[in-house]
Image: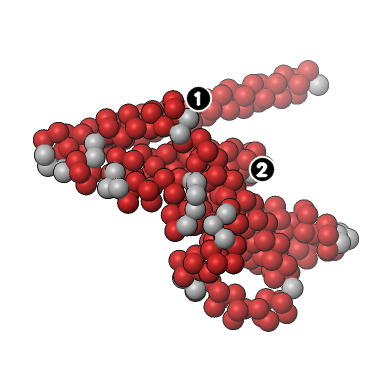
Amino acid sequence: MSAAVAARATVQASEATQGRKLATANRNRKLRMLGYQVALGVAFIALWQLGATTGALDPFFFSEPTAVFARIVEWFTSGFIYPHLLATTQATLLAFVIGVGGGLLLGVLFGRVQFLADLFDPFIKMFNAMPRLVLAPIFLLWFGIGIWSKVALGFTLVFFVVFFNTLEGIRSVPRVLTNNSRMLGASEAQLLKTVYIPSALSWIFSSLHTSVGFAIIGAVIGEYLGAFRGIGYVIAQAQGTFDTTSVFAGMITLMVFVLVIEFFITRAEKHLLRWRAAGTH
C-alpha cells in the first residue's frame, strides 16, 4: 500500500512540475509576443514621425504622432473628451448588450425549432444583406439625434453576427451527444443548459470579439451623421475644420477603447471556457 501511495505521490509531483513548466513557458511566450507587438507599434510610429518631419508625409493630411499624442493628453487633462467618450461608451454597450441578447435568443430558438428557422430564413437573409449605412438616416428620423438612433444602428450590426454564430454553434452539436443525454433522461431545458449552450460557447465568443468592433462602428457612424456629443461627433467636427490631428486623436482613442473592451471579453471567455483548456492538458 505504501509503495502505491508513494508512486501516486511521485506521479502527482511530476504532473505538478510539468504544469508549472507549461505555465512558465506560456507566460514567457506571451511576454515575448507582447514585446514584438510593442516593437512593431513603436516602429510604425517612428516611421510616421520620420515621414512627417522629413516631408515625405504632408502634416496637413497625416499630422504627426507627437501632435496627436499631445492632443490626446490635452483632451484628457482638460476633461474635454470625457462627455464624448461616455456618450460613445453608452451607445456601444447598449448596442452590444441588446444585439448580443437578441442574437443569442433567436439563434438558440431557431437552432432548436427548425420550423421557425425555415419560416424566417428568407427574411433574415434579406435584412442581413441590407447595407447598414442606408439605415442610419432612417434611424435618425425615427429616434432623433439622441442615443437610441446610435443604439439601433449598432444593434443591426451586432445582431446578425451573434445570431448566425449561435445558430451554427447550436446546429453543430453532435447528435450522438444529444441522443445519449436524452437516454439518460435529460429534459429539453437540461439539454439546453448542459449540452447546447456549453457546446456553442466557442462560436458565441468568436462572434463577441467581432461584435465589439461592430457595436463601436454603429455608434460612431451614428454620431458622425448626427449627434451633439460622442467620439464620432468630435471626429466629424474636426474633419469639418480640416483638423487632421484631432481626427487621428479621435481614431486612436477609439482603438484603445476597443482594446479595453476586448480585454474584458477575453477574460470572460477564458473563465467560461477554462474546462476546454483543462481538457487539452
Camera-nearest label, 1 or 2: 2
Residue type (three-letter) at the residue carrying disc 1: Thr
Residue 24, numbered circle:
1
Instruction: Using the rendered image of the protein, determine whether residue 132 is visible from the camera's viewpoint.
Output: no
Mark closest to the chain's N terminus, 1 or 2: 1
Which residue is found at the position 32% from the left and 50% from the top?
239
Which residue is found at the position 30% from the left and 48% from the top?
241
Q: Which residue is mark 2?
A: 272
Tag 2: Cα neighbours inside 10 Å, few (<14), some, or many (≥20)? some
Q: Is residue 43 left or right of residue 180?
A: left
Which residue is found at the position 65% from the left and 78% from the top?
120
Residue 269, x across and y down, in percent: 61, 43
Residue 146, x across and y down, in percent: 57, 54
Q: Is residue 79 left or right of residue 170?
A: left
Q: How is the image coloured?
A: secondary structure
Residue 109, x across and y down, in percent: 73, 67
Q: Is residue 274 left or right of residue 257?
A: right
User: The N terminus appears in which quarter of the rendering?
Assistant: top right
The quadrant holding residue 48 is top left
Instruction: Using the rendered image of the protein, determine whether residue 88 is visible from the camera's viewpoint.
Output: yes
Which residue is found at the position 78% from the left and 66% from the top?
179
Vertical placement of 16 versus 158: above or below? above
Residue closer to the observer: 245 or 227: 227
SS category of the residue bearing label 2 = helix
